[in-house]
Amino acid sequence: MSAVALFLIFITGVYFWYQEKYKRYNELMDKIPCAKPHPILNHLLYFINKRPGEIFIILEKMAKDHGPVWKFQIPLSEQIVVHDPKIVEEILLSQKIIDKSMEYDFIIDWLGTGLLISTGSKWHKRRKIITPAFHFKILDQFVDIMNKNGDVFVEKLKHFEGREINIYPLISLYALDVVCESAMGYQLNAQTDEDSEYVKAVKEITELLFLRFFDTTKRIKFLYQFTSMYRREQQIIKTLHKFTESVISSRREHLKGHDVNANSTTANDLQNIDEIGMKKKTAFLDLLLQVQVNGQSLSDEGIREEVDTFMFEAHDTTSSAIAFTLLNLAKYKDIQKRVLEECEEILGDDLSQQPTMQDLNKMNYLEKVLKETLRLYPSVPFFARKLNTEFSTEGYTFPKGVSLTVAPYFMGRDPKLFPDPLKFDPSRFDDEKNIRLFSFVPFSAGPRNCIGQKYAMLEMKSIISKLVRNFEITVNKENEEPQICAQLILQSTNGINLSLKPRK
């Protein structure tokens, strides 16, 4: 028998083996609505050679045509997208559907298996360790960091008076300064040193990760590692890790030099923040260096995982939310005026008056503005979970092994969930009981909700209240509609172009 014949027999055998092995999976997937697929490449042809903004438009059309439960399939990735609040509730509250999807594997080289990606006992252990780090007494210390870096931001913006600027990159630098000092106790000064190697590395890594998602050849780690993009990614990750490891080492020596035992605090001690007894500012890193679990401290690798995860999750997400909120305030002058009035009622008209955490918590109208912004422009437009078992709900049965993608972006724009959904109306949140449960989940929900959402809300209130008190914010009509894309985080391909006029 010829080699060709043997090869054909082998291929045929593999085909029938695959069909039998995945018969149940394929039967269930065939019942999920979708756009017309290619026989071999499925939906890949929809995305090939498309820019991030174009990809987002395609996904929006698929959601409109086939939602609220639909699928898209590209080689090595099959996603069921869900924007039905009933199903979203079951997914997010489930104790079984807590594993992140394989797409998160793309960031393991950078973040390791920290709180964002870890599963099972490791995730439960890390969650227990980290939760007290967002206790209100710790958050109160972070507000000082937000205020200080916010003042730098205000002074920087004064140089742009009378000019239209894309404010997003400047917000990103501000947020990077805040999160770096909050997470590591390190003053990065990104706002005054934009050429910092670390600053540039953070920006570039997020761009590369998004490009990889829709490139089939780069989704396969074995093939990806032979590409120039992989080599560049590894160089960037080396820069990021080197920086974090250096700060960890320096911070440990700092704690030892101040007679603070780096292995003296147990996870249970952290439940009572009063007992830490630190009068100085306590960075997130300090708590990780001191904590003990079952008599063992976290390894340097474990600490780096959590610090890098905090940096990743708290940087771009808040930058996005702040930018889109400022755009909305510029578009709707009456809303901007009302935010200003609330800030002045709480803080007075002395611009040097710094808000405390108590002041920020009183800014109820600003909070509604932020929530309405996150409804229309959720910083994380999609997040996915992997199914480790079949899951049946609302007439659907989802197969084991598929990724379930929850879509806050599509829910926020669904007229069945939010009447006149494109209208920016903070009064929607006057009584949140009127909002359908699990239709608004910008911070996720359930056991894997965003652990830092209170931190994020404080940071957003801190900087936006400061900017509104210092500047009148305007936007030209031709620039007021953002061109949405998602590079892991929701962004605008045409920037967030605003003008700022000092009020005094």
Image (spheres, rainbow, N blue to C red):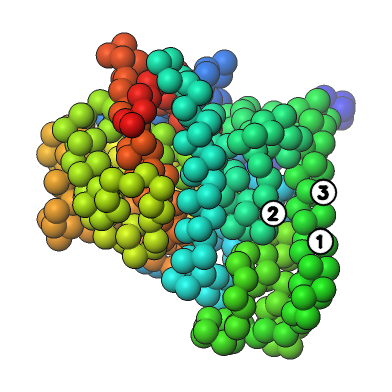
**Quadrant for the N terminus in the image:** top right
Query: Crowding at label 2, few (<14), some or many (≥20) Cα neighbours within 10 Å?
Result: some
Q: CA distance from mark 1 to mark 2?
A: 10 Å
- The quarter of the displayed image where residue 374 is located: top left
Q: Pick whichever, 358 or 119, lies toward us.
A: 358
Q: Is residue 83 visible?
A: no
Q: Residue furthest top?
A: 478
Q: Is residue 231 left or right of residue 414?
A: right
Query: Disc 1 vs disc 2: Cβ atoms closer than 8 Å?
Result: yes
Label 1 CA crowd tier, 10 Å (few <14, some 14–19, many 20+): few
What label sits on residue 143 in the rendered view?
none
Q: Which residue is mark 2?
A: 186
Residue 407 lies, in percent from the top left, at 37, 44
What amino acid is labelled 1 in the image? Ser
Q: Is residue 115 rendered to the left or right of residue 431?
A: right
- Mark 3 residue element: helix
Q: Is residue 369 above or below residue 471?
A: below
Q: Which mark is first along the chain, 2 or 1?
A: 2
Q: Disc 3 or 2, which lies upstream in sequence?
A: 2
In percent of the image, x 58 and y 29: which residue is there? 214
- Distance (Cα) linking label 1 and label 3: 12 Å
Above or below, 411 relative to 36? below
Residue 140 seen in the figure:
yes
Depth-wise, is mark 1 or mark 3 nearer the camera?
1
Find residue 326 and report its horizontal and vertical position in percent: 35, 33
Q: Which residue is mark 1?
A: 250
Q: Residue 242 shows which numbered tag? A: 3
Label 2 SS: loop
